Image (tube, helix red, strand yellow):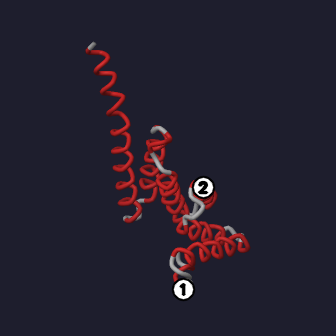
Amino acid sequence: MIRIVVALAFLLVAPMMAVAGMFDDIREGDKYAQNGRLEEAIDRYTWAIMDAGSLEKGNLTPQVLSTLHRRRGWVYAQKGVYRMALEDLNEALRLNPRDSLALGYRSRVLEKMGLHDQAWSDIREKRRILGRLEGDRSSRQVLTP
């Protein structure tokens, strides 16, 4: 009987521990990224993505995973690792096609890679999304993700 209770307790507590660990990794990743410690930031975001993947699919919204991939993608871009940045930003947009920050970051990465037409396509899509969200105000800030 005690084994059953312990097993049930573990099944209830394990997902909560994974969520807590994921949010700790996110905070650490943000801190490292802000301080220019890009390799450590990538490690923390990777751990958060792995923690998120270990949870049941129903426990996390696609927006959470999208945000994690967007953040790690932007750190890769800051390091100049554009292929990895593009992979993460593509995944962020697959999970949340209306993520205007991911579109802006991806447009910058595409520009650095010399893919100007694709970069402008992302900028236009970001303008369209922000125009709908903000009542089509000026697009001055759209060009700076």
- Compared across the picture, whether 20 is left or right of 109 comes to left
Residue holding disc 1 = 140
Identified by mark 1, the residue type is Arg
Alpha carbon of mark 1 to alpha carbon of mark 2: how far?
29 Å
Tell me which corner region of the image, top left, top right, bottom left or bottom right, holds residue 10. top left
Measured as percent of width and height from the top left, residue 125 is found at: 64, 72
Tell me which corner region of the image, top left, top right, bottom left or bottom right, holds residue 108. bottom right
Q: Residue at x 62, y 75 (%)?
A: 128
Q: Is residue 136 above or below residue 126?
A: below
User: In this view of the protein, which residue sits in the foreground, 87 or 35?
Assistant: 87
User: In this view of the protein, which residue sits in the foreground, 142 or 29?
Assistant: 142
Identified by mark 2, the residue type is Met
Q: Is residue 133 above or below residue 20?
A: below
Q: Callout 1: 10 Å neighbours few (<14), some, many (20+)?
A: few
Going from the N terminus, do you reach mark 1 or mark 2 first?
A: 2
Q: Secondary structure at mark 2?
A: helix
User: In this view of the protein, which residue sits in the foreground, 66 or 56?
Assistant: 56
Residue holding disc 2 = 84
Measured as percent of width and height from the top left, residue 80 is found at: 57, 64
